[in-house]
Structures are given as structure tokens and as C-alpha cells.
């Protein structure tokens, strides 16, 4: 049985701000909330006359929106950032090593774990080596995840603990990169990461609870009232249920299980909870390929800057198709990671086949996560097949500088084809992939509109014909995600009957420039009618 949400605040009338709708702002309207729901909308004085005991909340201009929904994040990873070496934004190898040296000195003993490095930001654009870490750390094992989560930089001590040497074969769905002498270089791609990662002591239940709460509060602070947590295992599921039982979840969580057969068999035999609650198992996350930055994304033709590879299949396609059909049959939602054009084509094909095999109408629309490199003909298939395009606009603005080198001049127009997806009738659901990228939704909104990074590069935007409008982008963060999650009546819009998940910003969000939009901060936030403390 779903757990009841925290008790909502008493009736309130929120007025003084424009109300944001899927068509744009509405002026002169107020919102009446009671019992965690929107009860009515209309002129403030009319609502007050009909509800004289309601508390009056006067907002000083700006815009009242439905609470943003983070469509794709990794909550525990986001919450763990403060407990690891943070290498995000390092501009060269010495800068990364400097952070590692400082962290190691302040946190001696045990495994050194971190994430966030990106060799594409470094002058040489070359992968780092185990030797670079050996000089600093000696026999202390290290495991440092690339910014996209699809490669790991490890040292010789970690390789030795895992038994990885020049005779170790590549595991299924992964690669052990080698140096010129055939020795492991210290870089593990996708499936090879598990050879070392499995040796790292997992967090205790209390530590995992703390990580989840830290991640959720970070998202709340950014203006989110709900999140789709993409790919959780049994320990994280147990932690969420502990927090839900204690009524400690600050925002709503839609959890997607890992493709773990034991976990799937146990959870999917239970009927999916369809009534909105603060925690629910929503579906299963599958992986087809790796990431473009580490050349693990699976392409239809070899990489332009490395013709010896077309990327990786990280999971057997037949297994994904079978498990996706099981997920659909059980009434849950498959969400498939696909970045390369070959992976997106395969995802579309196998989802169509899985739906036929499921033998029952689907309860929820299947999702493809990222949809970064997609041929024009496949972009049109999303809408025809009714498959959600779950995209993260900041990936485009973070990767634009090196994407043309990976794809070459003939294929680069396949990159981040948002307009093609919309023109084909696809439903867009926005997210950030945090902690891979900054979760800040205002940065993502500006990225969707300009296809430029915060520095204004590239001039005119990366493939500017694929830009989205402000209204389209806001819709993808609100009602688009609500529809993708199967809750269009409850979430994502300011309308009678919807839950009182509300965000107020002190700006006319439909009118400000992208530069101002990037700097915008949440002013006030309500979840289930209860105002959040954004100062904590």
C-alpha cells in the first residue's frame, strides 16, 4: 500500500504573480490550495470571498509555475559528491592531480573515490594514466569516474587488487584500454569498470540514507518537486523505503530499477502503484551503449576521430528486449539508455518488438534516455511509436566543442536533434543527468533555447535549427515529464485538481533573456501544499 504523504498545509490563496501555463503566462489570476491540491483558480478577491479563512500569500510579482520535475538524475550519486574527490571542471591533468592530492591529504586511508574528470576539456584531450595516480597515491587504490559515468581512471594498486593485467580479456560490454606495450593504461570503459568497482566497500545503510537525502535536498533547492531516479539497486530501494516510511522524503521520487533479474522478479510481480505518492517504483532502466565522450556510444559507422571503433554494446540486445517486454507486461515502464545513432535505432526496434511480445496494452509510454545522436528517419519514429524522448539539454552545450570531431561533417547534424523530435510528434521530457551535469533547470532551459554554453559558444548556437522555444522547454520540464510519468492530471500544470507542487520565481520567466534565465534562482517552493525551506 502506498504511504500517505506528509500532512498538507491549510488552505492558501497565492496571488500577485503571473501563472505559467503550457501556452505561456496568464495575468490577474490566483491559486487556491487546500489538502495538498489546487482547489480553484481565478481572481484573488473572488477566491478570498468564497474562502474567507484561507491564508493569503502575496507574491511580489514574478511567475508562479508548476514545480519542475527532474526527468533523469542519479540521486545517490548527486548526494555523494561532497564525500568524494570532485574533479568537475578541471581544465588539465595537473589541475585534476592537484585536487586529488589535496583530497588524499585531507582524507587518508581506504579507497580514494571521485568523479567528474573530462579529458576533452584538457589541452591534449588524451586519457589520463594509472601512472599519473601512482606517483601521488602509491599503494592506495583509486577509482575516479569520468564525468559521464561511462569510464573510470584507476591506478596500478586498483588494477592489481582486481587482478587486471596484460592478459585480462575485455569483459562483455566493456573495454580495458592498453598502452603501446599492451599493458592496462588505467582507463576502464563501461562494463570493465565493474571489475574494480565491485571491490569498493559499499556505503552503510545510514550513509546511503544520508546520500539520498542530500541529493533530494539539492534538487529541492534547485526548484524541483519530483525526480526520476534512473537505475537503482536493492540497497538504494531499501533506503528509499526507509525514508518514505519515516515521511522524510522532501520531494517525490519515481524510481527505475537496475536491470537486475533477481530485483526485477521480486519487484515487478507486485502491482505498480498508480496513485500518486511520495515514492513509487516506476520502471526499469536499461543500457544499450556507452557515452560519446569516451567513444563508447554505439554508432552506425566508425568514429571519425578513431576509425578503429564504432563504440560498444554494453548489454545484449536480446536480453534487453526480453526484459523490456517483461517490464511492459507487468505494467511498468522501460527506460533505455541510448546515445549513439546505432543504439537509438536498436532501442526503437526492440521497444516496438517488446510491446508486441508483451501481449497487452502498455500502461506507460516507453522511454529512450538521452537520444543524443539520432538519424532524421529515426527521430521521426519516436512520435510514431509513442516513445518518450528523455533528453538533457546541458549535454549539448557541454559537448558541442568536440562532438563534430567524433562524428565528422556528414553525421554531425544528427547530434541533439530536438526540433526533429518535436516535428515528428515526440513527447520531450527534460532532465540533467545529475551529477553528470549541473541539475540547475534554468541553465538547461537556456541551453535548450540557445544551444550555447554560458560563455556564448558557439556563436549562433550549435546546429541552431534544432533550438526549442521558451514555452517548449518549460513544458518539457513540467507537463512533459508529468505525461512521461503517467500523471498528467496530478503533476506538471497549474490547474484544478493537480497537486500543489508549486515554484515561484521573482521574474517574468517568459520575457527575460537567456543570460538572465541562467542566473535565475527559485524564490519559494511548495511540495504537496507545504512550503519548503530553501535556506537550509
Image (cartoon, rainbow, N blue to C red):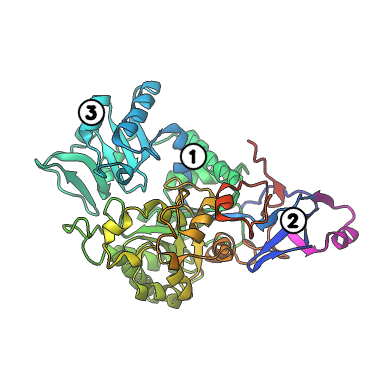
Relative to 3, is 240 on the left or the right?
Answer: left
Q: Do the residues labelled 3 and 1 touch (CB within 8 Å)?
A: no
User: Helix or strand or loop: what does disc 1 sit on?
Assistant: helix
Camera-side residue: 434 or 483?
Answer: 434
**Can you give x and y, in whole percent of width and height, for residue 432 in the image?**
47, 52
Find disc 1 in the rendering and name its residue.
79
Dot 3 surroundings within 10 Å: few (below 14), some, or many (20 or more)? some
Q: Give the range drawn in magenta.
A: 33-57
Whether residue 1 is visible here, answered yes or no, is no
**Can you give x and y, in whole percent of width and height, for residue 133 in the image?**
26, 30
**Can you give x and y, in whole percent of width and height, for residue 189 in the image?**
26, 48
Dot 2 surroundings within 10 Å: few (below 14), some, or many (20 or more)? many
Tag of residue 234? none
Camera-side residue: 369 or 26?
Answer: 26
Q: In this view, does 360 lie above or below 30?
A: below
Dot 1 surroundings within 10 Å: few (below 14), some, or many (20 or more)? many
Camera-side residue: 290 or 273?
Answer: 290
Q: Residue at x 23, y 26 (%)?
A: 135
Find disc 2 in the rendering and name its residue.
17
The part of the image, by quadrant, that contains residue 277 is bottom right
Find disc 3 in the rendering and name its residue.
134
User: Helix or strand or loop: what does disc 3 sit on?
Assistant: helix
Tell me the CA gap for discs 2 and 1. 33 Å
Q: Which of marks 3 and 1 is in front?
A: 3
Q: Nearer the viewer, mark 3 or mark 2?
A: 2
Image label count? 3
**Can you give x and y, in whole percent of width and height, for residue 19 in the image?**
71, 60
Quarter of the image for the C terminus: give it.
Answer: top right
Q: Which residue is drawn at 65% across and 41% down?
A: 534
Amino acid at each position: 500500500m502506498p504511504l500517505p504523504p506528509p500532512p498538507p498545509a491549510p488552505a492558501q490563496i497565492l496571488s500577485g504573480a503571473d501563472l505559467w501555463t503550457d501556452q505561456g503566462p496568464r495575468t490577474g489570476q490566483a491559486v487556491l490550495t487546500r489538502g495538498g491540491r489546487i482547489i480553484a483558480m481565478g481572481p484573488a478577491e473572488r477566491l478570498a470571498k468564497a474562502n474567507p479563512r484561507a491564508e493569503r500569500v502575496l507574491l511580489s510579482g514574478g511567475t508562479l509555475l508548476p514545480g519542475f520535475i527532474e526527468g533523469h538524475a542519479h540521486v545517490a550519486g548527486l548526494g555523494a559528491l561532497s564525500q568524494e574527490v570532485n574533479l568537475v571542471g578541471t581544465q588539465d591533468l595537473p589541475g585534476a592531480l592537484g585536487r586529488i592530492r589535496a583530497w588524499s591529504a585531507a582524507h587518508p586511508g581506504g579507497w580514494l573515490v571521485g568523479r567528474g574528470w573530462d579529458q576533452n576539456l584538457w589541452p591534449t584531450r588524451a586519457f589520463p594514466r594509472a601512472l599519473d595516480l601512482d606517483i601521488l597515491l602509491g599503494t592506495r587504490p583509486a577509482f575516479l569516474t569520468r564525468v559521464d559515468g561511462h569510464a573510470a581512471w584507476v591506478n596500478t594498486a586498483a588494477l592489481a587488487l582486481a587482478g587486471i593485467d596484460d592478459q585480462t580479456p575485455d569483459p562483455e560490454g566493456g573495454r580495458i584500454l592498453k598502452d603501446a606495450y599492451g599493458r592496462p593504461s588505467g582507463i576502464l570503459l563501461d562494463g570493465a569498470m565493474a571489475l574494480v568497482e565491485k571491490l569498493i566497500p559499499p556505503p552503510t545503510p545510514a550513509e546511503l540514507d544520508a546520500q539520498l537525502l542530500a541529493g533530494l535536498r539539492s534538487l529541492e533547492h534547485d526548484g524541483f518537486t519530483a525526480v526520476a531516479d534512473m537505475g537503482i539497486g536493492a540497497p538504494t530501494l531499501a533506503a528509499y523505503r526507509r525514508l518514505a516510511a519515516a515521511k522524510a522524503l522532501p520531494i517525490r521520487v519515481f524510481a527505475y530499477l537496475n536491470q537486475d533479474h533477481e530485483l526485477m522478479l521480486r519487484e515487478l510481480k507486485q502491482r505498480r502503484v498508480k496513485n500518486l505518492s511520495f515514492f513509487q517504483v516506476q520502471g526499469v532502466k536499461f543500457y544499450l551503449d556507452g557515452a560519446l565522450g569516451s567513444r563508447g556510444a554505439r554508432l552506425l559507422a566508425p568514429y571519425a576521430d578513431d576509425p578503429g571503433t564504432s563504440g560498444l554494446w554494453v548489454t545484449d540486445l536480446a536480453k534487453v528486449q526480453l526484459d523490456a517486454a517483461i517490464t511492459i507486461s507487468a505494467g511498468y515502464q522501460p527506460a533505455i539508455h541510448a546515445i549513439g545513432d546505432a543504439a537509438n535505432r536498436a532501442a526503437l526496434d526492440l521497444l516496438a518488438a517488446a510491446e508486441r511480445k508483451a501481449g497487452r496494452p502498455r500502461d506507460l509510454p516507453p522511454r529512450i534516455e538521452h537520444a543524443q545522436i539520432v538519424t532524421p528517419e529515426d527521430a521521426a519514429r519516436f512520435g510514431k511509436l509513442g516513445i518518450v524522448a528523455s533528453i538533457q539539454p546541458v549535454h549539448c552545450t557541454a559537448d558541442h566543442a568536440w562532438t563534430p570531431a567524433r562524428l565528422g561533417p556528414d553525421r554531425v547534424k544528427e547530434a541533439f536533434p530536438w526540433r526533429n523530435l518535436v516535428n515528428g510528434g515526440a513527447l520531450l521530457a527534460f532532465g540533467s543527468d545529475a551529477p553528470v551535469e549541473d541539475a540547475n533547470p534554468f541553465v538547461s532551459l537556456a541551453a535548450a533555447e540557445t544551444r550555447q554554453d554560458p560563455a556564448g559558444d558557439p556563436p549562433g548556437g550549435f546546429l541552431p535549427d534544432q533550438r526549442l522555444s521558451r514555452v517548449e522547454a518549460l513544458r518539457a520540464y513540467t507537463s512533459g515529464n508529468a505525461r512521461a510519468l503517467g500523471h498528467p492530471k496530478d503533476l506538471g500544470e497549474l490547474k484544478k485538481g493537480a497537486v500543489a507542487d508549486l515554484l515561484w520565481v521573482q521574474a517574468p520567466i517568459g520575457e527575460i533573456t537567456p543570460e538572465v534565465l541562467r542566473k535565475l534562482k527559485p524564490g519559494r517552493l511548495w511540495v504537496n501544499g507545504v512550503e519548503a525551506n530553501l535556506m537550509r
